[in-house]
Each structure stands twice: as C-alpha cells, then as structure tokens.
Image (cartoon, rainbow, N blue to C red):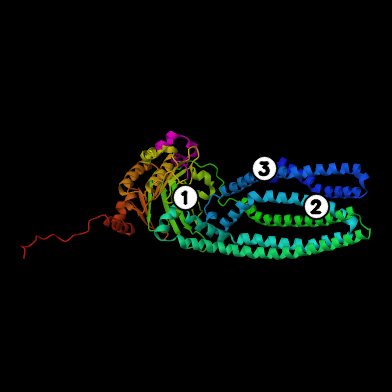
Amino acid sequence: MAWRAGAVWAVSIAAVTAVSSGVPVAVAWLTKLVLDRLAGGPGALPDVLGPALALMALGLVAGVQPSVRRFAGNELDRRISLLAQDRLYTAVSRLSGLARFEDPAFIDRLRLATQAGGSTPGQVLNAVFAVAGGLITLAGFLVSLLTISPPMAVVLLLGAVPVLGAELVLARRRAASDWRLGPVERREFLYATLLSSANAAKEIRLFGLAAFLHDRMLRERSVAERERRGLDRSELRIQLALGLTAALVAGGGLVWAITQAGRGALSVGDVSMFVASVAGVQAGLSGIITEIAVAARRLLLFQHYLAVVGTEPDLRGTRRELPPLTGGIEFRDVWFRYGPEHPWVLRGVSLVVPYGRGVGLVGGNGSGKSTLVKLLCRFYDPEKGAVLWDGVDLREIDPAVLRARISGVFQDYMQYDMTAGENIGLGDLDRFTDRAAVREAARRAGAEEFVAALPRGYDTLITRVFFDSSDDEEGVFLSGGQGQRVAVARAMLRGDRDVLILDEPSSGLDAEAEHELHTRLKEHRRGRTSLLISHRLGAVRDADVLVVLENGVVAEQGTHDELMAAGGVYARMFTIQASGYREPDRPAMTEPGPPG
C-alpha cells in the first residue's frame, strides 16, 4: 500500500534513513580520531582540521535530515491514509444488505479497521525504515565494540533477546485489549453523543437524565482505563528491570574501560569510542525492539482492516439487466427472521402485487409489514420461499439493478446534513443538480412553499451540525412534517420507477396536511405498481387490494368494502380507529324545572 500510494516518497525516506543511520557511527570514529590526534600535542592541530570539518558537515546533515524525513513521512502518510480509506469504504459499499450493519462484532471490526487502515501502513513502513536504520547504526557500533571488547558485545546482544520477547508479548496483549474494549468504547461514545445531541436534548433535560448518562459514560471510560492501566504497569515493570540491567552493564563496562586506560591498554580515544559504542549498541537495540513491537501491534490490528476489505459481498446477483415490470411481484411462501436466535417475523407469506395496481399492507406492530418492504428492496433474502419479479427470483438480480427500479419513502426516513435542494436531489443523482426537476419534485410533495421561504431557499442547510463555509451562515431546523415532505419529494424525483413503496409516508403530518399529501400521492400512484403501508387505515382504504398481516401470516385480503363486509381483523381495526373520530353518545338534554 505504501509503494502504491507514493513510491517516490517511500524511496526518499529510505535514502534519508540510510544516510542518517550512518551519521552516529561516523561521528564516533571522527571524534576518536580527533581526540587521538589532539593527544599528540600542539603540532597535531593541522591534522585535526580535516576530521573537524567532516564533523561539521555531519552536523549539518544531522540537523537537516529530521525536517526532510518528517516532510516526506507526512506526505506519504496522507497518501496512504487516502488509499486505505478508499479501499475500506469501497469494500463497505459492496455490502448491499443490512445484516452486517446490525452485527455488533462487525461494527467493532469496522471501527478498528478505520483507525488502523489509514495509520498502520505508514507506521509499519516507518518501523521498517527505523529498524533498517537501527541495524546500520547497530552494526557500525557493534564492529567498533568488537575491536575493543568482544565479551561486552556478546553480553549486550544476548541481553536483547528477553527484551524482544517481553515486548512482543505485551504488543499482542495490547492488540487483544483493543478488540476486547471495542463494545466498551462504543457505549462510552453513545453516552457522549447523547449528552451533546440536539435530538436527545429535550428528553434528557425534561427527565433529568444528564447526570445519569454522564455517570454511565465515565463508568465505561473507567473500565477501559483500568485495563489499559494494567498493561501500562506491566510495561513499566519490564522497562524498569531492563533499564536497570542496561545501566549496570554500561556502568560495569565503563569501569573496565577506565581501568584498562589507566594501565595503558586503551587510549583516551579508545575509551571515548568504547563509551559511544556501548551507548550506541544499547540505544540501537532498544530502538529496534521498540519499533518491532509497535509494528507487531499495528499489524495485529491491521488484520481487522484486511478482514473488512476482504469481505465478500453479502448479496449477489448474476442478472445485470432487468426488463420493466409487466406482470407483478409475488411473495411465494416467504419465511424470514433476523437471526437464528430471533423469532420468525414472516411465516409462509404468499401474496401478489399486480402490475399497475396499489396494494395496501395493514397490520399491527411487528406483523411483518416493513420486513416485506425490506425483502422487496433486497436488503435481506428470505430464508425460505422466494420474492419474484415477473417470475424471476430477486436473488438472481444484482441488488443495484433491482433498486434502480424502485422508489420509496421509509418510515425512518433520512434527513441529510446538507441543503434542502441536495436532500431532494439525492433521490436521483442523475438529476442532482437539475434545479427545475428538484423544484417540481418539491411542488408535487407539497414542499415547494416552505423550502422557497427558507433564508437561502433550496441552498439553505437544514442542519445545525455544520454551517455554510462561504458566509458562516447557520442552517435551520425543519419540523417533522416538513422533513417528511422533503423525503417524499426525494422519492418523487425518482420519477417513473417500476415500483413505488410508501411506508408510513405521512406519520409526522397533521390531519389536514396528511389528507393533502395522500391526495397528491394518490395521483402519483395512479397506474403505478405500489406498496403502501400505514397504521392509519383511512390512508390505505382506496388501495386496489388490502392485505392484512397478523403474526407474520396473511390473515385476509380484499378491497376495503369486501373486508368490512367480512367482519374480520381489518373490519375490527377500522372500526376501532373510526370510533375515535366520532362524538361520544351524550345523554338527552332535559328542560330545567321551576326554581325551588
């Protein structure tokens, strides 16, 4: 990934690393040379000039290289991060269904993948370069040390083995902890989001929930911090033990070198070289081990990125073309549940949505109405049975091809943190910037009047999350009914699609606005294949066919008049709703009698 993102920058970093890694060794040898020549007396000053100039040049290199290295590293990190994010969300976009996004383990993996994907390649590359540079420096000092004290070189190398083992074990424990703490951190983020959310602010303040949520947020944070603190303590114990051992080895070596110099076995330059070599070998080994441990932990976390990027599409389809609907849509003995541990939501549902006709789905909460819509859009596939488009099983159709033929408004519609015009334009990206088409869709949804009255009309942000960067103008809030009309306009923009789905399209509207919208939708639905869901039965009574779902099965179906005459589930529900709009019976008024 690093090579693909920026080969030139990677090579530049490698070159700078190689040069800078040799500088400390060269400095140590030149320093030894200068000291030995100075020990020869004043007459040796001309011989010192050359090594001194070389030391000055190395100082310039040492001073410049960090800035060059940092610049190249930052540029490479940016390029890698962009490539990693592109690959990650390309893979996420391949997931056509909803099941993965409802899986907590996948959400945790995606969070870690987002964190690790953009940073790990750069960090591992930096570690590789650091290890390579450290080996160069280490080799130089090690050769120098071998010329003075081979036993010391062996002691230092052997001492690095347990250090490396301990660091790798700790890296694995940290990576496992990051995965284990995923749910904890998501809950902490949830409570923090609620405390700062405009949507939740009303209830939180009315019910006095701020302190309760704040306490839960801190509790989750404490769980995570407790585990990380334990890992930090383990690391501290290891580092203290190793640091003390290194200090004792270096101190003992220094005493030995001074003793040898006192006997004349070593020169002043040799002592200087010995001290620099011991320090260089220790620092080099410590740096190499640290970089290896960091890379090991990052690579363990990078497995989550690779797992997401390598995720296969959850819903496949071989048909890349789909003829226009001519016959209708059939649900044939459809069984579905949201997981093996969950109850069946649909239990052998069979019904037909005829071409050019409107079918109203009626039923209580949990009866399976919205689930049928999700299966029609192929957000899921049925466990048993089939959904057929003119006799073709939807599982054979590419989900993108199928959805291009469908328009709809969902009960849990989205309001995007964009402008009003963009919110409507998202309904058909081919006409995203076609202001005339956007206005017409708003008009047909009854949204034109209030959108045009916004401070900047269709260019007004309908969110307070952002502000317009051109003039720092804040966005506006839409009422629930206004937001719902914008969602309907978004569906209207899709035009003449084969199937229109209306799942509670007027749930946020008052009675007058609801009547007006359904009048508009009735006109829009005329001659179209449509599926209409509403708990307000008056809004679906004019459908060509009404299908009543109860406990995941089709309880009855027919026209409004037929079902009322049958006196079954639909008639009972309709009667109960209608009774709420009638005046209750009042006792007859009597004439007042005479006073007294």
Q: Which residue is mark 3?
A: 75
Q: Nearer the viewer, residue 449 or 491?
A: 449
Q: Which residue is rendered at x = 31% and y = 55% of the image?
A: 563
- Coordinates of residue 105 in the picture (x, y in percent): 57, 59
Does the magenta portion include 168? no
SS at mark 3 in the image: helix
Displayed quadrant of residue 175:
bottom right
Residue 162 is left or right of residue 579, and the answer is right
Q: Nearer the viewer, mark 1 or mark 2?
A: 2
Relative to 107, residue 519 above or below: above
Q: Nearer the viewer, residue 419 or 445?
A: 419
Mark 2: which amino acid? Leu
What segment is highlighted magenta in the picture? 417-440
Main SS of the magenta part reads: helix
SS at mark 1 in the image: helix
Mark yes or no: residue 195 visible. yes
The disc placed on residue 376 is 1
Q: Which residue is mark 2?
A: 135
